[in-house]
Image (cartoon, rainbow, N blue to C red):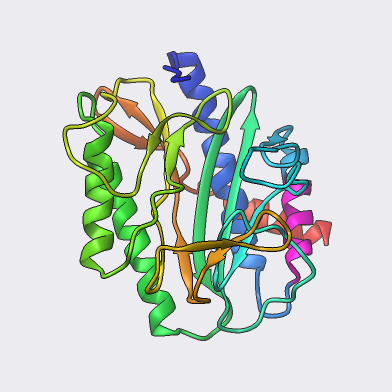
């Protein structure tokens, strides 16, 4: 299913996107050495509930997962890259953490992911990974104009990742989004320009470049959800939800000034 949102639905999408972005920034600020992944999940649950929103993850049970996900956020550490199931793990200084969050507010979903290094360490390999996914995301967004095709976005993303020297896995990528989290069209992280669905104003897409050092092969954890680098190498993942407009792409999942207020709120929640 490919949805084209009307102006009223796009207004709702902006609210959903801002909520996702603000929660992620608040969680990033709180995620320090010693923070438990289960606490991050609990904070996300509380903020989603206080906003009157709904989690897109708790009851999510696609064919590639083992039953309902059962948590409110994906927390992927170091060699984990996608669908990281929160578990009893205390973050260490220098860990590379990816937080991936999708919520639905007033019937419209938004999806975003950020990768960052925990603590004061600045491992060059991790920073390079994060930088490559962020630059690829910028390139994909820049290519997302009315009349462009999905292959143009995929090509723009893949060109940055390939130039940075990272193999590209095509099993998972970006996707359409709207009244549900995962919709058509699929947006691969590499592709040929001029191919695929033609973009139209009102289309929402979640673009999500992700890479692993030295491999494109994934393995699935014993939890049935967490996807890891097959070689144990580090990984990174960046994602924004965008809306196609007459003037180009509008990024919906950018943090707002209220993100600091949200950060204060989770401190009160404990």
Q: Nearer the viewer, residue 194 or 108?
A: 194
Apparent side of residue 166 relative to residue 83 in the rendered image (left or right): left
Apparent side of residue 30 relative to residue 88 in the rendered image (left or right): left
- Magenta-colored span: 36-47
Position above or below: 33 against 85:
below
From the top left corner, tell me how far across and down residue 31 is, in percent: 65, 69
Q: Residue at x 42, y 42 (%)?
A: 174
- Total count of labels: 0
- The answer to which image quadrant residue 181 occupies is top right
Q: Residue at x 30, y 43 (%)?
A: 141
- The answer to which image quadrant residue 58 occupies is top right
From the top left corner, tell me how far across and down residue 32 is, in percent: 65, 75
Apparent side of residue 82 relative to residue 209 in the rendered image (left or right): right
The image quadrant where one finds the C terminus is bottom right
From the top left corner, tell me how far across and down residue 204 is, in percent: 42, 29
User: Which is the main secondary structure of the residues drawn in magenta?
Assistant: helix
Position above or below: 68 against 114:
above
From the top left corner, tell me how far across and down residue 164 is, in percent: 25, 68
**Magenta highlight on residue 83:** no
Q: Nearer the viewer, residue 119 or 129?
A: 129
Q: Residue at x 54, y 33 (%)?
A: 182
**Magenta highlight on residue 39:** yes
Position above or below: 107 against 42:
above
Position above or below: 206 against 77:
above
Apparent side of residue 118 relative to residue 174 in the rendered image (left or right): right
């Amino acid at each position: 299913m490919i949805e084209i949102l009307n102006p009223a639905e796009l207004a709702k999408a902006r609210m959903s996107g801002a909520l996702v972005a603000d929660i992620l920034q608040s969680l990033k600020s709180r995620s320090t050495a010693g923070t438990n992944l289960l606490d991050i999940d609990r904070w996300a649950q509380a903020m989603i509930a206080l906003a009157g929103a709904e989690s897109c993850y708790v009851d999510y049970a696609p064919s590639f997962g083992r039953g309902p996900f059962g948590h409110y956020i994906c927390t992927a550490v170091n060699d984990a890259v996608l669908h990281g199931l929160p578990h009893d793990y205390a973050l260490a200084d220098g860990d590379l953490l990816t937080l991936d969050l999708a919520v639905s507010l007033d019937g419209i979903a938004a999806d975003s992911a950020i990768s960052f290094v925990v603590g004061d360490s600045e491992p060059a390999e991790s920073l390079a990974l994060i930088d490559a996914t962020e630059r690829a995301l910028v390139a994909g967004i820049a290519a997302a104009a009315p009349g462009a095709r999905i292959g143009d976005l995929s090509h723009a993303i893949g060109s940055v990742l390939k130039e940075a020297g990272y193999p590209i896995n095509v099993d998972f990528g970006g996707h359409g989004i709207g009244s549900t989290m995962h919709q058509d069209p699929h947006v691969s992280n590499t592709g040929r320009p001029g191919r695929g669905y033609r973009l139209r104003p009102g289309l929402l897409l979640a673009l999500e470049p992700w890479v692993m050092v030295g491999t494109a092969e994934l393995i699935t954890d014993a939890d049935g959800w967490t996807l890891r680098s097959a070689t144990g190498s580090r990984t990174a993942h960046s994602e924004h939800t965008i809306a196609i407009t007459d003037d180009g792409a509008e990024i919906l999942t950018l943090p707002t000034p209220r993100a600091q207020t949200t950060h204060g709120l989770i401190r009160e929640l404990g």
